[in-house]
Image (cartoon, helix red, strand yellow):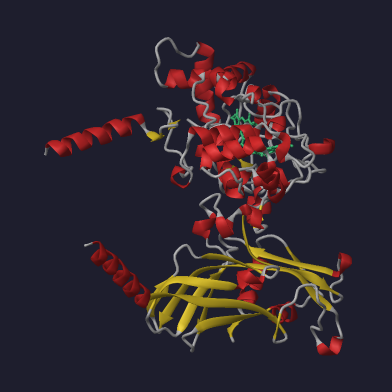
């Protein structure tokens, strides 16, 4: 009986911390993550190896481009100021680099969900002609020849010989540690002392819940689905989005709903980076919705927002900026 | 005392050995009844006098099981094998801990199932460095066949079949069941020329993404496996 009590008390303690792994604490206002940690249990050494790889141009063909060339920590790991990303030899890609955060909660990766599991995501930029233009076979053989990586792989996996599996798993480990959950919004929602919305932010929050939250659903600010939010199609890129992967015409021009956390910094906006600022995003949602057969039903009715409403909405969106995340020294490159 | 322990260990060792064995399954790619040789021209259609050659053949075999009629006799653990024509050692699969029981049919998958696809990065035969993983529409390639034929009106007369796709409606995994009669070893022929002859190389010669066609072709690929 006593034993049972101790065990259940322990279970309750464990549950209340919602600790998936000692190195991965689920924020109080977040749901359970999607990423299956049992297939890739975290360790400090694996995360450190993943971080070293993320910041190392060794992953690209001519050793000039690293993951961080397109995903900069100070701007929520986006490529600010470039509408579509730039890779080796100044080649230009076709899509805008998204912010990297809270990836353990993502069901799909890439704007069209081309990648279904986080571990395998890094293969895409490594092998894309316009990004790093390298093969995983070659990356692994470069890593096997490097003394630095022999040591790091040994520490992480007890095996100094790099493999594709271990390379991808460690990058994924660093990726899942990029948690953004300490914005002003989070602190207000968690009722932390000293935090409350201003009157304008609160008005903006209410407008957001009415007009935006069906797709940009709290607390992750995405419903993890593919939607058509009424953009006109860029004639040059002619990107059909999700339909390319699902080959279902009903998915034409649908893209993954991006999270709006740190949106203040992740400009330019949309899959092709067509809008340089939030004013233009709101102009799009209120005045310029392109009616087409796959347009999501929430946007078929016109959204009406006055100038003050728009300012309040933007004030609210700015409460999603998480300075602790942007400045977190744990995410900065180590000096070896 | 010491001796009796050694004897006991020996005894148990012999006992285990008697009950379980290794059992050999060979996958043997063939062209016109001969074992496939890469980069060597052959004639696919006698009357067309074509010149066809295979430069690459790789495919996954997984989930091997043996049955006696409908009774399951053996399931291989961690059953993932990459058969690669550039490495004939890969043709041989040693089934470990094989029981001393009768069986008369074998079942296996051509390709990698969706549960395994969902697991993320994996090692061994499934390591992404094996050249059998799609980066830009993530998932394993189940069956890869490449070559050259003057029947193909393509750049350098090349053909490339990369068959895969693990999610609805383009799930291309195939389950293959074959009757086997001898109990010593199983040799499974993989008649590559049959696949090419049925495909119609003039029209179908480049498949690189999961699609309806890839599912159709995967079914055809399953049809080229037979018992020697």
Q: In which quarter of the image is residue B45?
A: bottom right
- Determine if residue B63 is in view: yes
Q: Which is nearer the eye, A213 or A83?
A: A83
Q: Which is nearer the eye, A152 or A236?
A: A152
Task: Give above or below for A271 relative to B137.
Answer: above
Q: Quadrant of residue A92?
A: top right
- Determine if residue A321 is in view: no
Q: Which residue is drawn at 58% across and 43% down?
A: A160
Q: Which is nearer the eye, A76 or B2?
A: B2
Would you say A281 lies left or right of A6 here?
right
Task: Give above or below for A131 relative to B8.
Answer: above
Q: In which quarter of the image is residue B202?
A: bottom right
Q: Which is nearer the eye, B83 or A290?
A: B83
| Total number of numbered discs in the rendering | 0
**Residue B174 image point, x, y percent:** 56, 71
Location of the N terminus of chain B (image quadrant): bottom left
Q: Which residue is drawn at 48% across and 44% down?
A: A40
**Residue B189 image point, x, y percent:** 62, 81
**Residue A66 image point, x, y percent:** 71, 34
**Residue A67 image point, x, y percent:** 68, 35
Q: Which residue lies furthest to the top in this view?
A: A194
Task: Give above or below for B44 relative to A74.
Answer: below
Q: Residue at x 68, y 36 (%)?
A: A289
């Amino acid at each position: 009986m006593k034993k049972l009590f101790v065990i259940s008390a322990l279970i309750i303690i464990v549950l209340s911390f919602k600790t998936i792994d000692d190195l991965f604490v689920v924020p109080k206002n977040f749901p359970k993550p999607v990423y299956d940690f049992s297939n890739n249990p975290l360790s400090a050494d694996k995360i450190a190896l993943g971080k070293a790889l993320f910041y190392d141009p060794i992953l690209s063909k001519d050793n000039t481009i690293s993951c961080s060339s397109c995903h900069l920590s100070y701007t929520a790991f986006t490529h600010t100021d470039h509408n579509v990303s730039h890779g080796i030899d100044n080649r230009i890609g076709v899509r805008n680099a998204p912010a990297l955060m809270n990836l353990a909660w993502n069901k799909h990766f890439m704007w069209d969900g081309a990648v279904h599991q986080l571990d395998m995501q890094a293969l895409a930029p490594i092998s894309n002609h316009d990004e790093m233009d390298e093969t995983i076979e070659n990356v692994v053989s470069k890593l096997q020849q490097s003394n630095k990586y022999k040591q790091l792989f040994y520490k992480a996996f007890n095996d100094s010989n790099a493999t594709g599996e271990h390379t991808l798993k460690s990058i994924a480990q660093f990726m899942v540690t990029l948690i953004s959950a300490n914005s002003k919004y989070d602190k207000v929602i968690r009722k932390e002392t000293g935090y409350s919305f201003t009157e304008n932010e609160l008005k903006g929050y209410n407008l957001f819940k009415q007009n935006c939250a069906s797709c940009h659903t709290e607390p992750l600010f995405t419903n993890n689905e593919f939607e058509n939010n009424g953009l006109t199609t860029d004639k040059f890129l002619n990107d059909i989005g999700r339909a390319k992967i699902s080959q279902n015409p009903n998915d034409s021009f649908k893209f993954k709903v991006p999270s709006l956390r740190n949106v203040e910094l992740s400009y330019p906006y949309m899959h092709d980076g067509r809008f340089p600022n939030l004013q233009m995003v709101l102009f799009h949602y209120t005045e310029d919705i392109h009616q087409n057969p796959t347009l999501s039903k929430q946007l078929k009715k016109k959204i009406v927002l006055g100038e003050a409403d728009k300012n309040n909405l933007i004030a609210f969106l700015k409460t999603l900026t998480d300075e602790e995340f942007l400045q977190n020294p744990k995410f900065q490159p180590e000096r070896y | 005392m010491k001796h009796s322990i050694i004897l006991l260990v020996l005894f148990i060792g012999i006992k285990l050995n008697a009950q379980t064995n290794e059992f050999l399954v060979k996958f043997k790619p063939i062209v016109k009844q001969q074992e496939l040789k890469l980069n060597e021209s052959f004639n696919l259609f006698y009357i067309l006098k074509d010149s066809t050659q295979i430069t690459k053949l790789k495919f996954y075999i997984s989930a091997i099981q043996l049955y006696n009629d409908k009774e399951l006799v053996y399931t291989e653990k961690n059953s993932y094998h990459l058969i690669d024509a550039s490495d004939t050692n890969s043709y041989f699969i040693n089934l470990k801990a094989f029981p001393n029981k009768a069986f008369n049919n074998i079942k296996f998958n051509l390709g990698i199932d969706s549960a395994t696809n969902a697991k993320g990065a994996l090692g061994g035969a499934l390591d992404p460095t094996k050249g059998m993983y799609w980066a830009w529409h993530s998932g394993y390639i189940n069956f890869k066949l490449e070559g050259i034929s003057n029947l193909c009106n393509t750049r350098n007369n090349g053909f490339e079949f990369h068959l895969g796709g693990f999610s609805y409606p383009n799930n291309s995994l195939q389950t293959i069941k074959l009757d086997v009669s001898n109990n010593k070893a199983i040799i499974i022929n993989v008649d590559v020329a049959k696949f090419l002859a049925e495909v119609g190389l003039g029209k179908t010669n480049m498949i690189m993404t999961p699609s309806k066609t890839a599912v159709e072709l995967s079914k055809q690929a399953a049809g080229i496996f037979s018992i020697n």
